[in-house]
Image: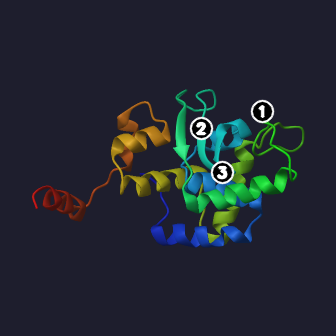
Amino acid sequence: MLKIITPTEFRKLDGALSQFSKKEAAILTLFMYCGLRVGEVCRLRFRDLTQENSVYVEVHIPGSISKTGIGRPVPIPPIARFLLNEYVREIVPPNASPIPLAFLFPGTGGLDHMSVHGVEQLVARICLRILHKHVMPHTLRHTYATMVLKYSNIREVQILLGHKKLSSTEVYTHPTIQDLSKSVNKTFS
């Protein structure tokens, strides 16, 4: 069964992002508002971010870090840009440019980038504190896909998630009778 958090839980988690470090908030933002995979977040480099007017507006997932080997652009919604930009301002000295090959989330203990396990623990710890339940990064990815699908089509969601097969994206579709009725009524009215 597909695990997602409810819209109420999503809003609660979003509302709590300011309670955490800029790094933690930026990591959560990439799951909640971009639907990235945990391995992708860990291996993002500065060169994978696109800027417009000094604001990061898009993440480009290179095929080399994507689970499916498919590169893709993922827009960063305005609501998430602030947190990502705040984090970058914190780690890049003023009047300096980030090193393109540097990892966005450097690791500790000799690691070049944060580990998957470390990011999973971070997300689980924060969600346990805020939502009082165990949530993994992939749950936030599922939630993102389910939310985006309400306002787009399955092909767009497939591209955003980097799925090779449409059948992988279909798991996010669970229309209710109200959804079906709305579609039919919209078509014939």
Q: Callout 2: 10 Å neighbours few (<14), some, many (20+)?
A: some
| Residue denoted by label 3 | 53
Q: Quadrant of residue 168?
A: top left
* Mark with earlier residue (1, 3): 3
Circle 3: element type: loop
Are the residues flagged by discs 1 and 3 in contact, CB closer than 8 Å? no
- What amino acid is found at the position of numbered circle 1 in the picture? Leu
Secondary structure at badge 2 equals strand
Q: Is residue 144 visible?
A: yes
158 lies above or below 93: above
| In this view, 24 is above or below 170 | below
- At horizontal 53% and vertical 43% (from top left) the residue drawn is 74
Q: Nearer the viewer, residue 144 or 81?
A: 81
| Kind of residue indicated by mark 3 | Asn
- Residue 38: image quadrant is top right
**Mark 1, residues whose alpha carbon is within 10 Å: few (<14), some, or many (≥20)?**
few
Distance from Cα at disc 3 to Cα at disc 2: 17 Å
Percent across and percent down for residue 105 are 76, 46
Amino acid identity at mark 2: His
Q: Name the N-terminal-most of marks 1 and 2.
A: 2
The residue at the point 81 percent across, 37 percent down is 99
* Disc 1 target residue: 101
Residue beneath the point at 39% across and 43% down? 156
Horizontal side of residue 6 vs 47, given as left or right: left
Q: Which residue is mark 2?
A: 60
* Residue 6 relative to residue 41: left or right: left
Residue placed at 57% from the left, 73% from the top? 12
Contact check, label 1 and label 2, Cβ < 8 Å: no
Locate residue 36 relative to residue 24 in the image: left or right.
Answer: left
Mark whose residue sits in front, 1 or 3: 3
Q: Position of residue 16 (x, y in %)?
A: 65, 72
Residue nearest the viewer, comparing 62 with 120: 62
